[in-house]
Image (cartoon, helix red, strand yellow):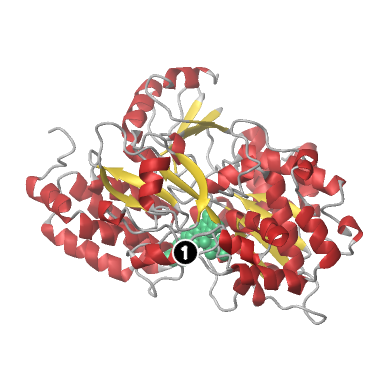
């Protein structure tokens, strides 16, 4: 069940849309903001509010890398693996983070603290290798600065 | 040297507020335009300036606009969309303009929207540019409060609604027809052309999509005229360009310079040359979908026509260098992994071909390749090339691959013959 506040925020988005489905991404993001991801139940509720079928909305939701249809940890690490970051040390950085947290790409730590994902170019090539944790950008990330960055997130 | 696009940008500081922007001469173009120019006048001036789209293809902006139906019988609702999807690996220039001077973008949007008489405008912003989103929202609110957006702008009778759509991360959304589908809440697969968006775009109505950097040029062209715009450019092309260099150079970054600045000037002067102990092996002139060029091309001018003549494309104008201590096969593998992941899956050659290319490159990189794989890759370059796929993503994906097979053939062969990557210790 969507909360009253979620429903209201989605209605607010709908006001600016030519047709309800145009608010699909915005609506899914409303749900994801608090809950971290979009469950089947939430997807059905959002679809109903947007006058879409769940399948139609899921086709859109699953298209995007940053709409999560599976649970993620409290923080999402998006590590850029595109060519500039790759050539400036992505593989080593990945190994290091993966060893420290005990997870690979697509996995979440046992304590639910972090999910690790590969990211396409973050538009920070002058700061390669770059990564984002939630909404924050870091770069250039070095093996020496990794601990400090991760320690900011509990 | 004039740097109209970046003159207000103060690195590591907040961008100019509306008041500061106006004090620096901002919104003068909008004021002049709304009081003295017709939409047609603006179109004529932009056409005369020879401004070419900075989204990658260099399509003349004035010409693009000229296909939009105008006048009494034209649809009342039309759209102007800023493409701020910037997800091409190697490209990071639009972020700088978005975060650095949001009012300049808004002013450009008002100019473009007025010229085509659009009623609604959108900024299509990529995922992960949260700071840009925040600063743009603030600037948009200021502009509304001061009657520079909304109903009856500055009492001129012209109205424009501007909204931001923040995407959720998919490179194909940058392709303009996929972008339009994304805005409609559909899966962001490209559309067939024709009809072109200028005639039938968002919700079937006339729509123009322009890149961020294209749009920020507009206020300056209105203020200073077409001849001035040509005069600050280079031999072949008008205006300035936001160039960039990234990779193993001493000073990666972005610089606004006259169109047609030489590659050597960018890599050696602006970026300070290669880091100690590294040599330049090759470079991509403007993002992941542009053919490699080599140190033999250091004297090529970075304008659309000159880079094309040299066998590549200027693309976004943000150069990526490949150094001599990085494996070119691994580098190309990383590139193709990106394209495979970002393919929208709509058409067969791209959906099936890119995973095949990626697996083949991975096999070669890890010492499991065979000589026949090189023929296979060459064949894939043809199958995914221009004319064989539904959009330009796939042809863009094989541009660097075909030039890698040309320039780094020895490296591919040595991986295969020696059954391991020479850049990795055994
Ligand atoms: C796969 C793909 C991705 C693209 N991504 C972008 C992008 O992120 N930003 C952009 O401005 N243009 C992008 N383009 C080009 C757009 O389709 C379009 O040509 C451009 O926005 C037009 O703007 P301009 O005329 O001002 O250059 C992309 C094209 C393709 C095929
Ligand atoms: S070329 Fe690739 S990205 Fe473009 S429509 Fe075909 S599958 Fe989609």
Residue A46 in sight from this viewpoint = no
* Quadrant of the image containing the C terminus of chain B: top left
Question: Where does the image place residue B197, in percent across and percent down from the top left?
Answer: 62, 72
**Which residue is located at x 83 percent, y 66 percent?**
B36
Q: Is residue B243 left or right of residue B45?
A: left
Q: What is the chain identity of the residue bearing mark 1?
A: B
Crowd class of label 1 (few under 14; some 14 to 19; many from 20; radius 10 Å): some
Seen from the viewer's position, the closer of residues B187 and B293 is B293
Looking at the image, which residue sits at the far right? B155
Question: Where does the image place residue B178, in percent across and percent down from the top left?
Answer: 56, 63
Residue ID for mark 1: B235
Q: In this view, does B82 lie to the left or right of B407?
A: right
**Which residue is located at x 43 percent, y 22 percent?**
A146
**Which residue is located at x 79 percent, y 63 percent?**
B33
As drawn, B346 above or below B132: below
**Which residue is located at x 64 percent, y 54 percent?**
B216
Question: Where does the image place residue B412, in percent across and percent down from the top left?
Answer: 17, 52
Secondary element at tag 1: loop
Q: In this view, does A2 lie to the left or right of B336?
A: right
Q: Is residue B426 left or right of residue B11?
A: left
Residue B94 in sight from this viewpoint = yes
């Amino acid at each position: 069940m969507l909360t009253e506040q979620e429903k209201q925020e989605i209605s607010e988005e709908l006001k600016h849309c030519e047709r309800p489905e145009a608010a699909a991404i915005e609506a899914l993001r409303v749900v994801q903001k608090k809950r971290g991801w979009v469950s089947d139940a939430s997807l059905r509720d959002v679809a109903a509010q947007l006058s879409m079928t769940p399948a139609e909305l899921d086709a859109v939701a699953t298209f995007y890398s940053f709409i999560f249809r599976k649970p993620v940890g409290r923080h999402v690490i998006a590590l850029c693996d595109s060519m500039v970051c790759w050539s400036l040390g992505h593989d080593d950085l990945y190994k290091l983070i993966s060893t420290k947290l005990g997870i690979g790409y697509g996995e979440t730590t046992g304590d639910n603290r972090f999910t690790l994902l590969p990211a396409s170019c973050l538009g920070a090539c002058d700061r390669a290798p770059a990564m984002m944790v939630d909404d924050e950008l870091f770069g250039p990330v070095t093996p020496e600065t990794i601990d400090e960055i991760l320690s900011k997130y509990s | 040297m004039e740097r109209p696009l970046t003159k207000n940008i103060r690195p590591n500081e907040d961008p100019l507020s509306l008041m500061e922007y106006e004090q620096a001469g901002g919104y003068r173009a909008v004021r002049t335009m709304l009081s003295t120019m017709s939409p047609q006048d603006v179109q004529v001036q932009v056409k005369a300036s020879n401004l070419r789209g900075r989204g990658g293809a260099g399509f003349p902006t004035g010409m693009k606009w000229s296909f939009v139906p105008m006048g009494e019988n034209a649809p009342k609702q039309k759209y102007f969309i800023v493409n701020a999807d910037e997800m091409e690996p190697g490209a990071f220039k639009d972020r700088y303009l978005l975060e650095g001077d949001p009012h300049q973008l808004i002013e450009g949007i008002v100019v473009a929207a007025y010229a085509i008489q659009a009623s609604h405008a959108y900024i299509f912003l990529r995922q992960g540019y949260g700071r840009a989103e925040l600063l743009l929202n603030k600037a948009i609110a200021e502009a509304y409060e001061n009657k520079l957006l909304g109903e009856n702008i500055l009492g001129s009778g012209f109205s424009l609604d501007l909204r931001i759509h923040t995407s959720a991360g998919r490179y194909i959304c940058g392709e303009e027809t996929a972008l339009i589908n994304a805005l409609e809440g559909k899966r962001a697969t490209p559309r067939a052309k024709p009809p072109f968006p200028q005639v039938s775009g968002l919700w079937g109505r006339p729509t123009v999509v322009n890149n961020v950097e294209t749009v920020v040029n507009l206020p300056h062209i209105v203020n200073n005229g077409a001849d001035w715009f040509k005069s600050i450019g280079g031999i072949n092309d008008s205006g300035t360009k936001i160039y960039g260099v990234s990779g193993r150079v001493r000073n990666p970054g972005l610089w606004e310079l006259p169109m047609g600045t030489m590659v050597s000037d960018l890599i050696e002067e602006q970026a300070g040359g290669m880091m100690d102990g590294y040599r330049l092996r090759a470079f991509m002139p403007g993002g992941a979908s542009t053919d490699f060029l080599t140190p033999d091309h250091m004297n090529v001018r970075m304008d659309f026509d000159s880079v094309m003549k040299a066998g590549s494309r200027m693309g976004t104008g943000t150069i990526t260098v490949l150094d001599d201590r990085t494996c070119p096969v691994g580098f190309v593998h990383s590139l193709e992994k990106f394209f495979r992941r970002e393919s929208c899956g709509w058409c067969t050659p791209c959906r099936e071909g890119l995973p095949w290319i990626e697996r083949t490159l991975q096999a070669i990189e890890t010492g499991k390749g065979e000589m026949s794989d090189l023929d296979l890759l060459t064949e894939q370059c043809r199958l995914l090339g221009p004319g064989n796929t539904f959009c330009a993503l796939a042809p863009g994906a094989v541009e660097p691959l075909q030039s890698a097979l040309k320039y780094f053939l020895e490296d591919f062969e040595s991986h295969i013959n020696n059954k391991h990557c020479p850049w990795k210790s055994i």
